[in-house]
Amino acid sequence: MTKSPNVVFNSLFTLGFNNPDNIYTNREKTIKRVVDMYKYYTNESKRAMSMYDYYTGKLTKEKTMNLVLENGKYATEKEVEKRKQQAVKYLENSNLWQGVISFNNDYINKNINVHRLEHELATKILPMFFKKCGFKDSKKMFYQLSLHTDTDNLHFHFSFMEKEANYVNSKGKLNYRYKGELSDKEMNFLKNQIVHTIEKENIYSNKIKEVNDELDDLKKYFNPDEKNFLLCDKKSLILESKIFDLGKRLDELGKVKDGKIYYNSIKDKKTKELVSEIKNYLFSKSNGEFKKEYKKFKNTLKDINKHFESINRNNNINTDEVDKTLVDAKEKRLDNYINNAIVNYSKKKLTENDFLKILVHQTYNKGKLCNKKQVLKNYLSKSNIPFNNKYEIEKSIKDINYELEKSAEEFSKLFESDIE
């Protein structure tokens, strides 16, 4: 039986518009395909997130895209947009080469940290490969790569072009490379360099470096041969992290006084961003019971706000200058957290964001927001609810429906008479 290779390399090419061998090409379709290549490369659902990325908060702190540049660093969204334009510009004279390097997962997990390999590819292996392909100066090459985890095998997508004439022809002069197809020697050179890098890592590094005691403790949940600790369900893990960050931030802002929550005074940009991101994560479900609960929640919220408007109209109160005497007089009869929130927000309409802040902060104060280590232990052991914070917030949203309906009924009674 033939043994499956540890590294597989496939490639394709697109001839430059001015390439003499390019007899016919649909310019608009070709440009669109080049631009769409970046959308495919940077697709977040294909991005690898490891235990280390989650634990250090790397993917939630850095606004980077899943695209590695020539210097081995991840591109920003602005850089990706710029590279789209550059690629179209270079395509006038240069061919576009695209490749996929796939791995046997057991082989790579046992021997090297995949992000180290990613950096080595960008900064060392590909520059050597370009010289093997006949290009004189690797600094005059335009290239990028992206690690994807959406198939059974880990794989890198990469592409490269010439920024200017950089190919040494048979006469020793520089011009653009006309030939698009890569030779077997060129492709085998790249595979050999990758295998050598992986094996070298295995020889000189017997364990993952720079891990602290807590990460060592978490490693026991993984297969002993696996060194990359790649995590599934990235979306829920990132949501947990954002809920924790928001709860901590709200607590630090100190906007809770005398049992009341004064979120209207919060102008913190980061807080607003976190609320918006959490809301998008929680409320973006396309089906299921939670979507029904959320719809019901929003409808009941509208009813509460109608009560506010009715109360103001009946008492000739300008909505911008609310007389809170009426509300304050009834405050003693409003003793659950929804009613307290209504009292606090008597000047403004209630929004989902208001309640989300309240729920996150209350969950945080109850000590139910686990730190990153505990979240990972729950997730990896499966002994508890893997995403406790997400569960608590979703449960609270469901409970809110009952509380809101109850509050709406109470409101009708609370303001039937004048101030006592």
Image (tube, rainbow, N blue to C red):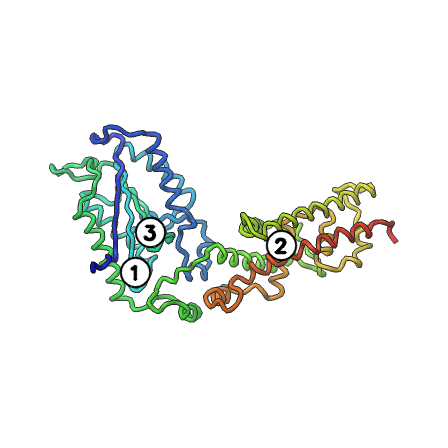
- Is residue 256 found left or right of 33 in the rendered image? right
Tell me residue 345's x, y (percent).
Answer: 71, 50
Residue at image point 37% right, 34% down: 32
Residue at image point 30% right, 35% down: 90
How many C-alpha atoms fall within 10 Å of the one at disc 2: few (<14), some, or many (≥20)? many
Q: Helix or strand or loop: what does disc 1 sit on?
A: helix
N-terminal-most mark, 1 or 2: 1
Residue at image point 20% right, 43% down: 182
Q: Quadrant of residue 198?
A: bottom left
Instruction: Give how far apart the Cα atoms at labels 2 and 3 are.
Output: 38 Å
Q: Amino acid at mark 3?
A: Gly
Instruction: Give how far apart the Cα atoms at labels 1 and 3 are.
Output: 19 Å
Q: Amino acid at mark 1?
A: Ile
Q: Which mark is residue 357?
A: 2
Q: How many marks?
A: 3
Tell me residue 143's x, y (percent).
Answer: 30, 44
Q: Is residue 325 visible?
A: no
* Outermost residue to the front: 1
N-terminal-most mark, 2 or 3: 3
Tell me residue 28's x, y (percent).
Answer: 35, 30
Q: Helix or strand or loop: what does disc 2 sit on?
A: helix
Residue 48 higher or lower than 40, as above or below: below
- Is residue 379 found left or right of 416 in the rendered image? left
Residue under pointer 1: 108
Q: Amino acid at mark 2?
A: Lys
Tell me residue 217's x, y (percent).
Answer: 43, 71
Residue under pointer 3: 72
